[in-house]
């Protein structure tokens, strides 16, 4: 069996792309041949032993282009090990409400496939990288929680997850 793994991601401001890059580096250090490809490039599914799919959150869910990729490749994804990760900036707490909100992000994904692994990672919010409309939507989406600005990514958590997937 091939040791090729596809890591594909959907990112609006680059935070999720940077997370995917770390996952790529860890998998490569484990001996896998990794292709790191933005979903916007419409990667082919041919020849991979496994796929890792990641998306940032916008308006309470995965980005539409990633959901479309999954829908288009659903048959192939159901036949090989698949892992998913979500990068988000709200609902970061350990409480039941935050956990339920995180799980809600991936309900559409779980309706199309059953991932072997799943992770949720805190993201990065840089309002300067957002369009005016996205800045407004971000303020609305964070509501009472307030808009978090800064880099909340836990690189050790991300590396640790990448060390264990598909072991």
Image (cartoon, grey):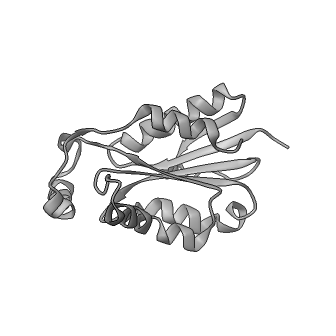
Residue depicted at 68% across the width and 42% down the height: 5
27 lies above or below 165: above
Q: Position of residue 117 (x, y in %)?
A: 60, 53
Q: Nearer the viewer, residue 49 or 38?
A: 49
Quarter of the image for the N terminus: give it: top right
- Determine whether, in the image, residue 155 is placed left or right of residue 27: left
40 lies above or below 144: above
- Determine whether, in the image, residue 79 is placed left or right of residue 88: right
Q: Position of residue 95 (x, y in %)?
A: 33, 59
Quarter of the image for the C terminus: give it: top right
Residue closest to the far right: 1
Number of marks present in the image shown: 0
Residue closest to the far front: 95
- Determine whether, in the image, residue 46 is placed left or right of residue 103: right
Residue closest to the far top: 29
Q: Position of residue 116 (x, y in %)?
A: 65, 56
Residue depicted at 72% across the width and 62% down the height: 76
- The quadrant holding residue 143 is bottom left
Q: Nearer the viewer, residue 58 or 92?
A: 92
Q: Nearer the viewer, residue 149 or 10?
A: 149
- The quadrant holding residue 160 is top right
């Amino acid at each position: 069996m091939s040791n090729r793994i596809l890591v594909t991601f959907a990112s609006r401001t680059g935070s999720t792309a940077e997370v995917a890059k770390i996952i790529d580096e860890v998998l490569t250090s484990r001996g896998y041949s990794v292709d790191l490809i933005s979903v916007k490039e419409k990667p082919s599914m041919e020849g991979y032993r496994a796929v890792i799919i990641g998306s940032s959150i916008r308006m309470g869910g995965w980005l539409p282009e990633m959901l479309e990729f999954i829908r288009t490749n659903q048959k192939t994804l159901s036949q090989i090990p698949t892992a998913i990760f979500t990068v988000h900036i709200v609902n970061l707490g350990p409480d039941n409400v935050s956990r339920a909100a995180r799980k809600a992000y991936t309900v559409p994904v779980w309706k199309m496939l059953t991932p072997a692994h799943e992770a949720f990672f805190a993201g990065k919010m840089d309002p300067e990288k957002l369009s005016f409309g996205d800045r407004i939507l971000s303020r609305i989406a964070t509501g009472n929680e307030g808009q978090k600005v800064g880099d909340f990514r836990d690189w050790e958590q991300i590396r640790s997850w990448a060390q264990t997937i598909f072991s």
